[in-house]
Amino acid sequence: MTRMALAPGFALNVEVEGSGPPLVLLHGFTGSAKTWGPLAPLAERWTLVAFDIVGHGLSDSPPDLDHYAMETCVADLVAATGSLGFSRAHWLGYSMGGRTALHVAAAFPEAVRSLVLIGASPGIDCAEDRIARRSADELLARKIEAEGVEAFVDYWENIPLFSTQKLLPPEIRSGVRAGRLRNSAAGLANSLRGMGAGAQEPLHQRLASLTMPTLLLAGSEDTKYVAQGREMAAAMPHARFEVIDGAGHAAQLERPDRCLELIRGFLEDVEGADQHGVAP
């Protein structure tokens, strides 16, 4: 555990493990740096830099929304990664963390050697749909503040997006639940307000300018994100999309073996191309 102060009274927690080229890991909503256990074998080849995103885990959960704004969040993450000595890294994000990694690539392309996105999207393109999503997220944020984290986790675990996780072994499901329960109500509520898909700038029109090598993954049962993954791969110049058979939204949790195989191969190809001075 390393607490990194980025502003007076504000710090992010980061867990660093392994050796080799840096690979930044960004978890999904209600997750933390601890949720990457299934991909821990990557530390044999890469330095894993796993952050607790603002409002999650052991990072601070400030009461104001300034640090939860996507543009501030990505600037903080890039600054913290640079302070660790990594001016350029591979970035891997899941769900909310995938949207965040995509914003890092758009705002700080020089800091991104490659992208791996799992169950991620470029946001919501339709203005009316963004307004509706912000309204829904505000209601959910108020629910968290009023009822507490445990009641919210009971609700969150039973939304359709996570239905396939009910098939996981009990010990894995209990570990995921324990991690969710360690979050604070204020942090989760403000994360929805500041970093929800309705609050962020949509990136659909900028995908063609993101020229870094990109691997997009989605579980075969996560049909919404399969469609979005295909669309993103078609729009990005050096992206490819892979379906993870037998997985839902959290493919890295439900099919870690296949995710490890694809991610490892992709990163090795990128670095091999670097060594030989050719496009990956």
Image (cartoon, grey):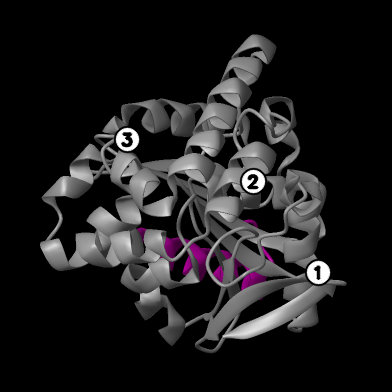
Q: Would you say 95 lies left or right of 83 here?
A: left
Q: Name the quadrant containing residue 218.
A: top left
3D distance between C-alphas at marks 2 and 3: 21 Å
Question: Mark 2 or mark 3: which is in front?
Answer: 2
Q: Would you say 125 lies left or right of 256 here?
A: right
Q: Is 267 within the magenta?
A: yes
Residue closer to the observer: 83 or 246: 83
Residue at (42%, 62%) from the top-left corner? 263
Q: Would you say 22 lies left or right of 246 here?
A: right
Question: Mark 3 or mark 1: which is in front?
Answer: 3
Any mark on residue 56, and which? none
Q: Which residues are magenta?
A: 262-280
Q: Name the quadrant containing residue 141.
A: top right
Secondary structure beneath dot 1 equals: helix
Residue at (75%, 37%) from the top-left corner? 209
* Residue marked by disc 3: 161
Q: Return the disc, 2 or 3, that comes first in the chain's sequence.
A: 3
Q: Return the disc, 3 or 1, that comes first in the chain's sequence.
A: 1
Secondary structure beneath dot 3 equals: helix
* Residue marked by disc 1: 79
* Residue marked by disc 2: 190
**Residue 280 in view:** no
Q: Main secondary structure of the magenta part?
A: helix
The type of residue carrying mark 2 is Asn
The type of residue carrying mark 3 is Leu
The type of residue carrying mark 1 is Ala
Residue closer to the observer: 5 or 222: 5
Q: Is 186 within the magenta?
A: no
